[in-house]
Image (cartoon, helix red, strand yellow):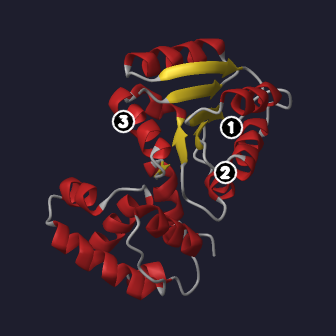
């Protein structure tokens, strides 16, 4: 059974492009919305597996889409939410994720052109996972703070944490860095020890732990 999608995007051409991409990938787009209030109505009516939402939507054309996405997450947590943004706004990602990294994603709009990667992100969010755009994660990791525990991480540990914050599994990290899964587990154990957070076996909890640290 194909995943059911509701799309919230006010730019007609981009919305049509996303619909075609998703349809070609085997998803079922059950509704489209061009403004935030209509998006909320259609998500409530159709109960999709995933809502794909633009940050900036009418009526305010500011963060109306983000606020709608946060409302969906708060009132209908069983629905996955994947937010698309034109800008790598760290604040948007942190606000969207809140206290739960389940069924949530934040990607830059240019990621849509990576058809396979975008489709994979939708599936990951629908399955209960999390997806964060690499540019946003890199920006988070690049912030300089006084007495920053990140300074204690080795270059390899920083690479592992960046991939971990993107929602990658141990296997995915190992494949990306061309190392063994055992080596990845060792790095993750060291990372959590240095950051003072407890390691969790579930991927989205690991993401949440990293983001909790980065929000300090």
Q: Quadrant of residue 41?
A: top right
Q: Left or right: 35 with respect to 125? A: right
Relative to residue 121, is residue 100 depicted above or below?
below
According to the image, label 1 marks what residue?
55
Q: Residues within 10 Å of mark 2 (few under 14, many from 20)?
A: some
Question: Mark 1 or mark 3: which comes first in sequence?
Answer: 1
Where residue 164 appears, as percent x and y from the top left, is 38, 63
Find out whether the residues at labels 2 and 1 contact each other: C-beta distance under 8 Å: yes
Mark 3 vs 2, N-terminal side: 2
Please name whichever residue, 21 or 152, is drawn nearer the observer in this view of the structure. Answer: 21
Q: Position of residue 103 (x, y in %)?
A: 54, 49
Quadrant where the image shows the C terminus: bottom right
Query: Would you name the residue on which mark 2 appears?
Result: 92
Question: Does residue 26 appear to the left or right of 37 in the view shown?
Answer: left
Locate the N terminus by quadrant.
top left
Q: Which residue is mark 3?
A: 117
**Mark 3, secondary structure of its residue:** helix
Snapshot quadrant of residue 155? bottom left
- Residue 41 lies, with reference to residue 11, above or below; the image says below
Residue 143: percent from left, percent from top: 54, 67
- In the picture provided, is 97 more to the left or to the right than 70? left
């Amino acid at each position: 059974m194909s995943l059911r999608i509701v799309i919230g995007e006010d730019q007609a051409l981009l919305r049509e492009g996303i619909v075609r991409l998703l349809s070609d990938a085997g998803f079922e787009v059950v509704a489209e919305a061009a403004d935030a209030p209509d998006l909320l109505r259609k998500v409530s009516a159709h109960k999709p597996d995933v809502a794909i939402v633009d940050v900036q939507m009418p009526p305010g054309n500011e963060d109306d889409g983000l606020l709608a996405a946060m409302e969906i997450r708060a009132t209908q947590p069983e629905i996955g939410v994947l937010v698309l943004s034109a800008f790598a706004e760290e604040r948007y990602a942190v606000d969207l994720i809140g206290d739960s990294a389940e069924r949530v994603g934040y990607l830059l709009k240019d990621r849509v052109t990576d058809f396979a990667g975008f489709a994979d992100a939708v599936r990951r969010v629908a399955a209960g996972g999390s997806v964060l755009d690499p540019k946003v994660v890199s920006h988070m990791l690049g912030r300089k703070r006084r007495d920053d525990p990140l300074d204690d991480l080795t270059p390899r540990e920083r690479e592992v944490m960046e991939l971990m914050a993107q929602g990658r599994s141990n296997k995915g990290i190992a494949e990306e860095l061309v190392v063994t899964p055992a080596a990845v587990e060792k790095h993750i154990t060291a990372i959590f020890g240095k950051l003072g957070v407890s390691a969790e076996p579930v991927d989205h909890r690991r993401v949440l732990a990293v983001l909790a640290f980065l929000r300090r």
